[in-house]
């Protein structure tokens, strides 16, 4: 009987894991099913580009996984029963229950409104393609001089504010950050960020904690209001809620607690990767939600599953960071080099060269989804036992 592997979610981590498993294991031994609600791969790191009117090349999964042995199932995941080893999905043919021997949970995350009143009704998000397309339509209808407020001073907020300001210099773009602008960066990195924001005419409101969003303004905790024909909300990510509703061990936010091989600490037949996993990195610090974490956790899980099924050697590498890559429009960028546990060091790459570097990183991430077998020998190994039998 074939060993049934189901991968939930085809973002960066899920798609890479499915392709890598297909390369490592024999089709005669395993059946790999990739469940995703959309037929095309979404380059989430480019949603700010989509929002300002840029067109992204389609990347259909039917082409990505042609002749790999991976079966793509277009359906929305509605539930997971980790004790019965089943997944409930809803697709074009209605509700269905899938049974697995090994589950790779990669449902990822969406925008996090932080419980702030008015965000659902009045704010736009760019954590998803539908959200980016809604923002794209709204921005296209804005007249010159109208105000746009980006809430959130993290990487997504910085990229959204600069992309909008560059694409629409006729708009009045502002950014509201809870702390100081780029206060986690090196002095060189922060200096470049301030220079670019100044050149693009972006107004920065530091230490501005937005406590409510209304149709025409964002309200700050100190009582001030920022006029906003459009409010873009980028204050972090919230994981998909399904895992928290299961018997899987999760943290308070719903991330699945895993060991060093991305295996659930409560259910040995379940692996979690990407934003869905509470995985520890260098310094015993949780990996942050990002593409930079998703790719190595996908490699780790796929290699561990293959090793346990074939009697091979388990991967021992701990995912680590090298840099934070920030696009500041199409012509500027910032590459902040960091320690293994993601703390900024003095070195930073800036300007046009950094923009080229970031573009190569984005292209490399998409290439990695379509070609998830870097460093894997062509010869697939035979399944010899069930993964739960090996530690």
Image (cartoon, helix red, strand yellow):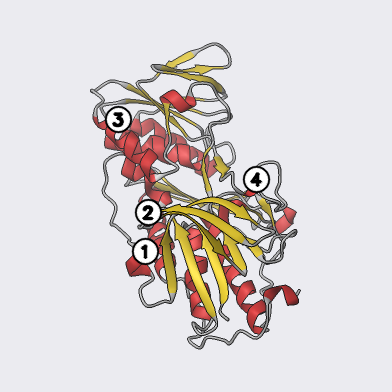
Q: Position of residue 61 (x, y in %)?
A: 36, 64
Give the label on residue 61, or none. 1
Q: CA distance from mark 2 to mark 3?
A: 30 Å
Q: Do the residues under discs 1 and 2 have CB atoms within 8 angstroms? A: no
In this orientation, does residue 63 appear? yes
Q: Which residue is mark 2?
A: 92
Q: Position of residue 259 (x, y in %)?
A: 72, 62
Give the secondary structure at mark 3: helix
Q: Which residue is mark 3?
A: 138
The residue lying at 56 percent from left, 79 percent from top is 2
Q: Do the residues under discs 4 and 2 have CB atoms within 8 angstroms? A: no
Q: CA distance from mark 4 to mark 2?
A: 25 Å
Sequence-wise, the earlier of marks 3 and 4 is 3
Of badges 1 and 2, the one in the foreground is: 2
Q: Specify few, some or many for label 3: CA neighbours under 10 Å numbering under 14, 14-19, or 20 or more.
A: some
Q: Position of residue 272 (x, y in %)?
A: 62, 59
């Amino acid at each position: 009987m074939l060993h049934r592997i189901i991968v939930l979610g085809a973002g960066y981590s899920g798609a890479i894991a499915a392709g890598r498993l297909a390369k490592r294991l024999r089709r005669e031994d395993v059946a790999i099913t990739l469940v995703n609600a959309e037929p095309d791969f979404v380059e989430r790191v480019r949603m700010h580009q989509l929002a300002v009117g840029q067109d992204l090349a389609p990347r259909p999964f039917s082409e990505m996984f042609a002749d790999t042995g991976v079966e793509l199932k277009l359906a929305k995941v509605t539930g997971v029963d980790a004790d019965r080893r089943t997944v409930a999905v809803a697709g074009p043919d209605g509700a269905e229950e899938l049974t697995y021997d090994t589950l790779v949970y990669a449902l990822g995350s969406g925008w996090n409104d932080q419980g702030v009143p008015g965000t659902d009704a009045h704010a736009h998000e760019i954590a998803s393609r539908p959200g980016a397309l809604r923002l794209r339509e709204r921005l296209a209808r804005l007249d010159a001089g109208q105000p746009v407020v980006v809430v959130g001073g993290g990487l997504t907020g910085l990229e959204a504010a600069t992309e909008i300001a560059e694409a629409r210099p006729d708009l009045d773009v502002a950014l509201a950050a809870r702390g100081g602008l780029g206060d986690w960066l090196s002095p060189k990195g922060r200096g470049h960020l301030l220079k670019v924001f100044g050149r693009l005419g972006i107004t920065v409101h530091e230490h501005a904690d937005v406590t409510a969003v209304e149709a025409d303004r964002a309200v700050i905790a100190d009582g001030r209001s920022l006029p906003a024909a459009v409010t873009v909300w980028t204050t972090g990510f919230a994981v998909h809620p399904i895992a928290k509703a299961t018997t899987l061990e999760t943290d308070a936010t719903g991330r699945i607690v895993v060991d060093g091989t991305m295996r659930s600490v409560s259910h040995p037949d379940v692996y979690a990767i990407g934003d869905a996993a509470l995985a520890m990195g260098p310094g015993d610090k949780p990996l942050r939600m990002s593409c930079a974490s998703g790719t190595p956790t996908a490699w780790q899980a796929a290699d561990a599953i293959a090793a346990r099924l074939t009697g091979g050697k388990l991967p021992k590498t701990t995912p680590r960071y090298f840099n934070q890559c920030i696009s500041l429009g199409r012509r500027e960028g910032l590459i902040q080099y960091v320690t293994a546990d993601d703390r900024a060091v003095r070195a930073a790459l800036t300007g046009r060269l950094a923009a080229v570097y970031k573009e190569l990183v984005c292209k490399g991430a998409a290439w990695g989804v379509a070609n998830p077998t870097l460093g894997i020998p062509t010869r697939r190994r035979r399944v010899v036992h069930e993964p739960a039998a090996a530690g």
